[in-house]
Amino acid sequence: MNVSTLLVTLVALALFSYVFGKQRALSIAKHNRRSLHSIPSYYGYMTALWCGLPALLLLFLWLLFETIVIEQLLIASLPADIQSLPSGQLSLVLNDLKLLATPDLMDSTEQTKLEAVKYLLSMQEMSNSLRTVLVLILALAGAAWGFSRVIGKTPARLLVEKVVLFFLILSSTVAILTTIGIILSLLFESIRFFGEIPPQDFLFGTEWSPQTALRSDQVGSSGSFGAIPLFLGTLLISSIAMLVAVPIGLMSAIYLSEYASPAFRSVAKPVLEILAGVPTVVYGFFAALSVAPFIRYWGEMIGLDVASESALATGLVMGIMIIPFISSLSDDVISVVPQTLRDGSYSLGVTQSETIRLVVIPAALPGIIGGILLAFSRAIGETMIVVMAAGLSANLTVNPLEAVTTVTVQIVTLLTGDQEFDSAKTLAAFALAIMLFISTLILNIIALYIVRKYREEYE
Amino acid sequence: MNNTEQIKKSLNKRYRKEKRFRFLSLLAVLIGFACLLILLVDMVIKAWPAFIQTEVKLDIHFSQEKLGLATNFDPEELQNANFRGLIKQSLQQLFPMVRKRSDKRALMRLISVDAEYRLRDKLQAEPQLLGQTVPIWLLVDDDVDTYLKSDKQFGRVSQEQIAWITELEQQERFQKRFNYWFFQTGDSREPELAGILGAVIGSFYTLLVTLLLSFPIGVMAAVYLEEFAPRNRWIDFIEVNINNLAAVPSIVFGLLGLAVFINFFGLPRSAPLVGGIVLALMTLPTIIIASRSAIKAVSPSMREAALGLGASKIQVAFHHVVPLAMPGILTGTIIGLAQALGETAPLLMIGMVAFIVDIPQGATDAATVLPVQIYLWADSPERAFVAKTAAAILVLLLFLTVMNGLAVWLRKKFERRW
């Protein structure tokens, strides 16, 4: 039985357990209404939980460890000379065997591999049937146990509610588990990377060419991992984006919150927010195929040499994407500024624009800066626009007309090609990602702190 | 000159400044609108050629001899029969002057590589056609298609080919029709054959996994945090975590998926299952935050009334609070899923960039999703893929519009003020 049929069977069994448990409770209640601790349906839930939960847990653990255990057993069965291969080659052999282990490929397999493949297939089959049998037995046993517990004095509701509460708590920790998962996976691979490349070379090196050679005598075989050009490229593109987004976003927010009629505002705000809802891959296409050629064309008209993957085009389009972030965040903080401040200013004979510039904006400034920082962290983490429209080769320059590459572009190019997972090249992606994660995290924490502090001031 | 006069004199200047400031801020809003408009119009203009496909009418003689079939042949043999030869023969009759081998090959290149399979399907469906000559509409190659659509300004067709195309045009053998093929197939290396159905189905499975994981977990987490959680450091820590996760770059989630789910747990690469899990982790903060505010908005009197009638806290939460908050929760979920539908970067990391022709049959099959398909096509050198990309973008935007429209409708319809 495959996993999905097994799951469906489990659900069906749990449903049956519910019905039987409830029936039994009802029949007890028929004799003596007050002999039950809880409403009959809770006895049904209890039986269903006993049936489903342990079995599901077993299935989950089985699936988690199945591949690892089978792999170990398979390795143990292989001839000694294969076992002693380095881990990279060994995993290639294993992958090969796994690919061969489909019924229709069996005929074409070489004799030497045939035995291992047969062994693998038999193990997979055995694991499959053993899994089905054990899970179903556990489900039935659980159901029987739960059913036997359907007696008057069992506090079924309390038991069920305890389980429910446990799941509620478990769900709320998923966010923490995700964060831990991110940190651990990035940290683990980065440490391996820094074992090969010294951190100071990575952080302060100005040469980025991550090609690791196939042979040791090849030219440029060492590969150099100086990340400064990437950081600079990221900063250049995000700065261009902010130069576009901050004035437009801020001024839109001012118009929408201070000047616009309610009717205009109720239309304009959602329309601007559509810009934030457009998938970034669409912006990437727009930047690469429409904006970049356009800028290149006009650049050549006035005699400028513009690269076809110029930082300017990429930053411009990224700026368009960021506009709604800035405008809605600024709008929020501007509308928190108390009306009394404006009224006080008007009563002194100050015009509306002067009030905005001299009273409202300074009052809202911390919140606006927080919003800008959030938008900036969004810009440096943005991937698709730069992958599609920015350059691939590292270029240490601040000229917006040239092509630069960014941290996210390099992560994608390092990990989407075909290469073994252990090379410095793929590990470098994790080191870059941890830099990205840390910098966006710091930006966010500062921004949220500023915004919260500012809100408290007026509430 | 006294003060009043001075102020009066400066007033005009200040009013002008006022007007200028107001105009500038309005201009900013209009620039935002203009960007959106340009983006959409650009996509529509780029996309339209993809929805129209050129076909060419060829008189095909289904000759048994040319197909390489014996008189009493097994129907199975049709699979490998020489249908390409039929097309060659038909073209030869149209252009008897073409003699050189290289020219003949160039002539064949006018027709899509798919044409022979269409002929085979046709003959298998109607065996009585054998031995007859019938006019049949066949797909043209993408270069010819682009040439005909782009007002004859396209460099990839040679002078001879242009002559043949003009000849065919004069015989009125070309027809343009709606490209329904685009919505019925998976990816292909040949632009005229590439479709988005595979990507749409892949997106569907991915979003299904995302929904099944993120909706229950998100709602349960929100219920716990709003209704049960004590106010302490641990809960503050959870909240900070949720807020930070919402701002973690999406590509980092992709690396998490690669390192944990693929390399550590050994889940299949390129599968909607892993994509769905990664996107579920990404959408969780959105759903939790939306659900919490929906739950918070339920009036405390509802809770007190239920508690007063003897309901337990769990009963209050699941029988009263969650149903009342459901419109808000669903709105948040749909918005979260819409974000997940447009997400590309994390899926690149877990290998969903593979070139996949088949339409996925389940959540563990190798698949690609709409935004990744857009990325792949945008990278392809053939010019016809530009239109395909823009067309796929329009389809994606259509899905997003429908989802967001649904969310807005839900909010409007069930919005309740206490």
Image (cartoon, rainbow, N blue to C red):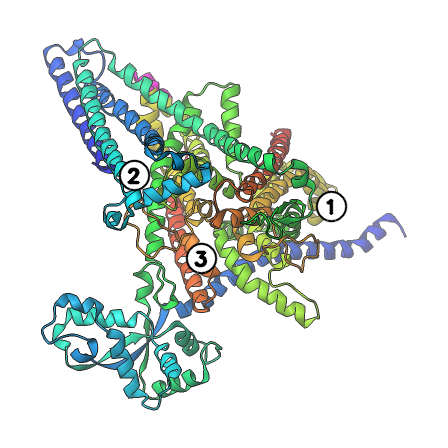
Q: Is residue B306 magenta?
A: yes
- Quadrant containing the C terminus of chain B is top left
Residue B152 vertical position relative to residue A195 in the rendered view, above or below:
below
Residue A183: x percent and y percent?
A: 53, 32
3 and 1 marks on the same chain: no
Residue A68 vertical position relative to residue A384 in the rendered view, above or below:
above
Q: Is residue B137 left or right of residue A189?
A: left
Residue type at the position of mark 2: Ala
Residue B95: x percent and y percent?
A: 32, 88
Q: Nearer the viewer, mark 2 or mark 1?
A: 2
Label 3: how many Cα within 10 Å (few below 14, some 14–19, many 20+): some
Kindly report the distance in space between the C-alpha atoms of the residues bearing marks 2 and 1.
87 Å
Secondary structure character of the magenta stretch overall:
helix
Q: Chain of mark 3?
A: B
Label 2 secondary element: helix
Residue A116 badge: 2
Magenta highlight range: B304-313
Residue highlighted by disc 1: A350
- Which of B336 and B59 lies nearest the eye of the viewer? B59
Residue type at the position of mark 1: Val
Residue highlighted by disc 3: B376
Residue B316: x percent and y percent?
A: 33, 23
> Could you tell which of marks 2 and 1 lies nearer the N-terminus?
2
